[in-house]
Amino acid sequence: MTCPKCGAAVTGNMKFCRKCGASLQNMMQGQPNAQNQPNMYGQPNVQGQPNSYGQPNMQGGNNMYGQPNMYGQPEMQYGTVQPKKKSGLALGIGVGAFVLAVLGAGAFFAINILPGLLKDPKTLFAENVVTVTRNFSDEFTDFGTKPVEAMVHLGMDDSKDSHTTTKITTIESDASGKDQEYALEQTYSYDSGSGDSAYTLSVSMGDASLGTGGVYFNGNEFIYSPANTSSPMVRYELDESSAKALGAYQAIDRYTLMLTGMSSEDEVDWDKQLEDFLEGSLEGIDKKEFEKSSEEYTIFGKTQKCDTVSVTVTGQEAKDLMEGMTKLITVGMSNGGDFDTEEIFGDKEADDSISLTATTYSYKNSPVGVVISVSKDEETYSINLSGYSTGKEKQTIIDIPSEKGKGFYYEDGVYSIDSGYEVLNKINFGEFSIVVDETGKINGEDRDLSGSFTIKTGDKAGKIHLKENSFTGSISQEITDGKGQFVTEIETKEGHATITTSYERGKLQEDKITAPVFLSESGIDCGRDLDDLKESIHSKLLGDKKGKGDSNFARMGNRNSLVRLGYIISLMGRNR
């Protein structure tokens, strides 16, 4: 016999079901048995539900699996002990709590566990690769910006609201007297109503002004005002739709987008990228070749046990898989650029002696990293890519070795430590390396950070006029309610230098966002001719070189904030 409610096996002397607690007294009075009830397999399954890879994980929550279940409790002697009757309210509360517990456990299982169990390892591998690549690519914009902000206090603006941000930087050193000390004043302005924006840079040495340059976007007009007053101003007119679309961006981003002929940032269709990856590079690989296991991986500076999915291929399959994964990375970093992998690597024939193993790592059901290991003969090298964020913590890592073992390494991490943060940035270009390490508190736009940086120049010390090949310094940031300062101290054999910047973000200042009056008789009016504008301001962007094989590949660097800042600074200093 079976329980009419849950279908569990019961005996004739039982008054209550041991599994669900249902009364069995009326079981023989024509009640339907469980075999006639719809089972769970007839219900809609969860395969159509969104998976959890893009959602915040539940690291801070307690799951239901650590709770004691009913099977470990002493069994009730149903034949000799009559259960006490409960009031309807108490019984309702008990049943409600039980239902909520079951639903909670079921929801956790369905959202966090079941998707990985139901998907074949090939699909799971592809989704993991795309998720890590997407998270990594989202951080490409900030590559290299941390050292520049921390050490020389140059940075980007934002378009959150109407404002003018002013940074005044003074540079003092043992090697220069008071009359040779430099001062830089930067202003970043944005009007959220009109979409107007501007960036200005003033330079002085001692009491002498070396000029003020600026770029202004007012309505449909772009105005460049050089610091050298003997150089001509330049005017360019945007069409109305482009000007309106570019109104969502602050001046430095807008300048690069305008010069590349874009009116907005591109977006990547990651669902399409996943589909292409499965139907392209992975199509010829049988799902049986993908293996699930567990290995250790570094997450937020700590070694953690992770679930893995890996595949090993050779020859043409290895070539196809490498090209497919490379395309995902370049598409993400360029924000949708379409690159021919032959343009990047050349049309290399498949080599049967090459073996490629690609492994994805997932921590608490969230993809965190991808490692690609390539072997030929007795040599092996590995590429490590990580993009992972919990909301309060994040890590971005790319490690690409060269044939000599000294390639490119980049790491950017924000690690939560109690109520504070550690911000760590590492960049290695062969023998040249920069490490910035800060600790303190980050609360919205407020900062209270202090730390250090180390620069190793290798054999390039002479090229940057230093006697030693490494030096260190200290850094600090204090910003509260839009006001504060940055301080950098540098100690070298040449002497001591201090860079101090006062920071203030306040109400929009009309005189900082409004361009000087353009006079056509003394300036250059480019009309709507973008090529004429680029020629007039001597603009050279990544990927502009004609006939160069990697021009399209190089163009993806235009999405990087440091590159965009470099374009503006170069423009300001060119005609000084």
Image (cartoon, grey):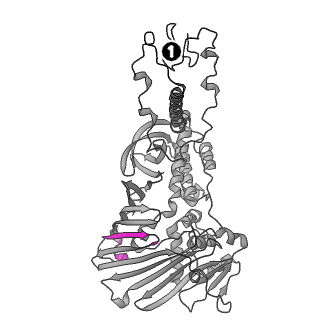
Q: Which residues are magenta?
A: 460-484
For disc 1, the neighbor class at 10 Å (few under 14, some 14 to 19, many from 20) is: some
The residue that appears at 51% across and 46% down in the rendered structure is 351
336 vs 56, nearest the viewer: 56
Residue underneath mark 1: 16
Magenta stretch contains residue 70 = no
Query: Going by the picture, which residue comes out furthest to the left?
Result: 493
Q: Position of residue 497 (x, y in %)?
A: 32, 79
Q: Quadrant of residue 148?
A: bottom left
Q: Quadrant of residue 451?
A: bottom left
Give the residue type at disc 1. Phe
| Residue 349 appears in the rendering | no
Q: Is residue 297 above or below residue 144?
A: above
Side of 329 relative to 262 (left or right): left
The residue that appears at 51% across and 15% down in the rendered structure is 16
305 vs 507, nearest the viewer: 507
Q: Position of residue 275 (x, y in %)?
A: 62, 45
119 vs 401, nearest the viewer: 119
Q: Is residue 303 above or below residue 556?
A: above
Q: Secondary structure at mark 1?
A: loop
The residue that appears at 54% across and 84% down in the rendered structure is 213
Q: Is residue 268 above or below residue 259?
A: above
103 vs 311, nearest the viewer: 103
Q: Position of residue 38 (x, y in %)?
A: 64, 22
